[in-house]
Amino acid sequence: HQSPSRCVVMNKALARLLLLLLTVMYSASSSSQDMRWEAGVGLVGVTLPMYPGSSQDTSYLIPFPYLRLESKYLDFDQGIEGKLFSSNKVRFSLSGGLGVPVNSAESNARAGMPNLDLVLQVGPSLDIIFDKRSQGSREFRLELPVRLAVATDFSSTRNTGWLFEPRLVYESKRKQKAGWAYEYLAGARFATDKYHGYYYNVDPQFATASRPAYSASGGYSGLFTDLVASWRKRSLIYFAWIRYQYLGGVQYEDSPLFEDKDYWFLGIGVNWIYAESK
């Protein structure tokens, strides 16, 4: 179930985030002579827990602008890749991620506690390329991203700590405009006490008989594996992805807000491309 208020918050957040990304991409790529781009609109439906470790799921159906960009300094497709430095074996890039907002009134575990804002993650990544084939369309690599997490409602921001997510990635891109592309990855997450605390701390004023006060420490934060696949025909791109995260043995497992060690994220959607570079 998705409340109207949550839908409005998500759409506003995504619109503002997209505007920021477009500004960054234009600034980084406006001087490039070999820039390639596609623009369109998309619709995606996702189902995921309210927050990692929550026993309650939430769903979103979100329309969004679609933009794919390839340039000398920046790529933007499934994620953002800022090409700070690149060679055949090593690449320094930018890494990003996000955590969805949570209305605590809709969460049994967090009832009476403050809401969780949208959490944006950004930072550098060292990518070690083990194997590259088919003129770069297939790649096996180790990614070592370090990200700063910031919670925001777009009227204020709050530093929520750091994450380190080493992962192995196998990616296969489309050689032509039509056909399949997919990416498989598996890795582990480690985070600071501030990041864990944002989701799992219970301050004394919010403690109850069934929800004792708790203060999280930093360290191990779970294992995860992702599969993302897309198929394109003419101006339509159909895509789906699934993430499984195992949270057994995590540093915050004694928190009363931690309920489920199995974390699933499912999404499916379509993009319609209506304009592209020549």
Image: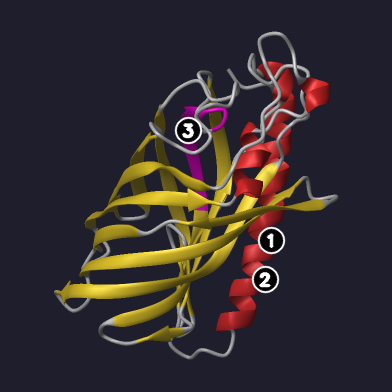
Residue 44: x and y in percent read 48, 38
* Marking on residue 23: 2
Residue at the image point whose x is 50% and y is 29% from the top: 253
Residue 94: x and y in percent read 50, 70
Residue ID for mark 3: 45
> Would residue 205 appear left or right of 239 to someone viewing this image?
right
Quick one: label 1 or label 3, which is nearer the N terminus? 1
User: Chief secondary structure of the magenta span?
Assistant: strand
Q: Residue furthest left?
A: 134
Check contact, mark 3 vs mark 2: CB within 8 A: no
**Residue 181 lies in the magenta-colored region:** no
Q: Nearer the viewer, residue 7 or 47?
A: 47
Among the 4 quarters of the image, the one containing residue 108: top right
For the question of whether residue 277 can be seen, the reply is: no
Label 2 neighbour load within 10 Å: few <14, some 14-19, many 20+: few
Q: Which residues are magenta?
A: 41-51
Residue 22 lies, with reference to residue 82, above or below; the image says above
Label 1 neighbour load within 10 Å: few <14, some 14-19, many 20+: few
Residue 216 lies, with reference to residue 236, above or below; the image says above
Q: Quadrant of the C terminus?
A: bottom left
Check contact, mark 2 vs mark 1: CB within 8 A: yes
Residue at the image point whose x is 55% and y is 82% from the top: 29
Residue 110: x and y in percent read 68, 21
Instruction: Measure the C-alpha gap from mark 2 to mark 1.
Output: 6 Å
Q: How many marks?
A: 3
Residue 16 lies, with reference to residue 24, above or below; the image says above
- The amino acid sitting under disc 2 is Thr
- The amino acid sitting under disc 1 is Leu
- The amino acid sitting under disc 3 is Gly
Mark 3 secondary-structure assignment: strand
Residue ID for mark 1: 19
Instruction: Measure the C-alpha gap from mark 1 to mark 3.
Output: 21 Å
